[in-house]
Image: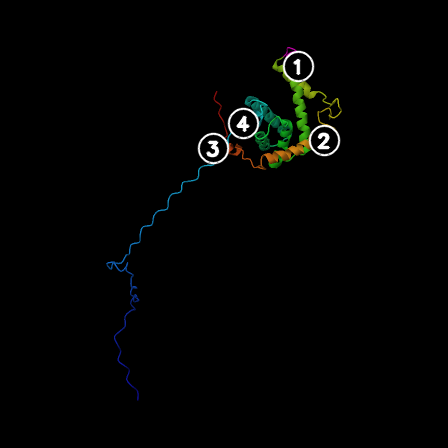
Amino acid sequence: MNRPPPPAGPPRGPPGPPKSRPPPPSHKSGSGSTGKINTSAAPQPEPPLVPPPPPIAHEYFSESKLPSCKSSYCTPAEERTIRRRTCRFLEEACRVLKLPRVAMSTSMVLLHRFYAVHSFEHHDRFEVAVGCILLAAKTEESPKKLISVLQECYRLKNQSKRAAAAAAAAKKSGSGSMDSVSGSAATVASLNLASVSDDGKTKTDKRGYLDLKCETFIKLKERILLLERVILHTIGFELSIDHPYKFLVEQIKKMVPSRQVEYIA
């Protein structure tokens, strides 16, 4: 016999929010407290401000502290003249060797850094200049052979000496005008420069280049190779030099966008 279904209860609504649990009992501040809950945390002290580190002081020194001036080898004015003439020699040698302008400037920077530590009295500036050209050419990815650099620099050095001697002779003779001096220099450049020293150690051909088998060339080559290592140790192997030419070109392009410069007299 079938039983009748149970009576339907009241309709159920949607489920309500979950019942929250009662908060845990809070701890009181102590036995002597008034029973109030300490809900505010104590303020934390701010960390003390640390002052920034002082800027690194670069070591600058006056010209009187340069090695050549300290040893009384020359005065500051004379040293400036020597440096200027050596840089002029570097510029002309790099032009003859067809080196880029960046390599030329790098060789000058190496020369100044070297003679900031050493004296002109102890190291021949011509030999140091040749070593600086070799290092600068390698640094700026324009290497040159040692024989080529040595031959061109030796020829340029002797040519300038002969031109200076011709200019001095022209002044003594009374015809010291600029035309006569420049003409005498051009005459020296076109002369046959073949010569042999009295002791037979130095031999040059008609163009002024050293004989590769003479004693002067062999010794000069060894000194240049040694000086190249001395220069590297002196500058601390710091061969990365930032030149201002890139930034100057960028600023000039901003100032003169049309690439036309107006000269105002």
Q: Which residues are magenta?
A: 168-175
Q: Which residue is mark 4?
A: 65
Q: Which mark is residue 124?
A: none
Q: Earlier in the sequence, mark 1 or mark 4?
A: 4
Circle 3 packing at 10 Å, graded few (<14), some (14-19), many (20+), is: few
Give SS at disc 3.
Answer: helix
Q: Which mark is residue 254?
A: 3
Q: Earlier in the sequence, mark 4 or mark 2?
A: 4
**Where's residue 121, x and y in %?**
62, 26
Amino acid type for the residue under numbered disc 4: Lys
Amino acid type for the residue under numbered disc 2: Ile
Q: Nearer the viewer, mark 1 or mark 4?
A: 4
What distance separates the C-alpha of mark 4 from that of mark 2? 36 Å
Q: Nearer the viewer, mark 4 or mark 2?
A: 4
> Looking at the rendering, in which quadrant would you find the N terminus?
bottom left
Drawn side of residue 248 relative to residue 156, left or right: left
**Where's residue 79, x and y in %?**
57, 24
Which residue corresponds to the image point at 59% horizontal and 34% vertical from the top-left? 234
What distance separates the C-alpha of mark 3 from that of mark 2? 52 Å
Q: Which residue is mark 1?
A: 169
What distance separates the C-alpha of mark 2 from that of mark 1? 33 Å
Q: Earlier in the sequence, mark 3 or mark 1?
A: 1
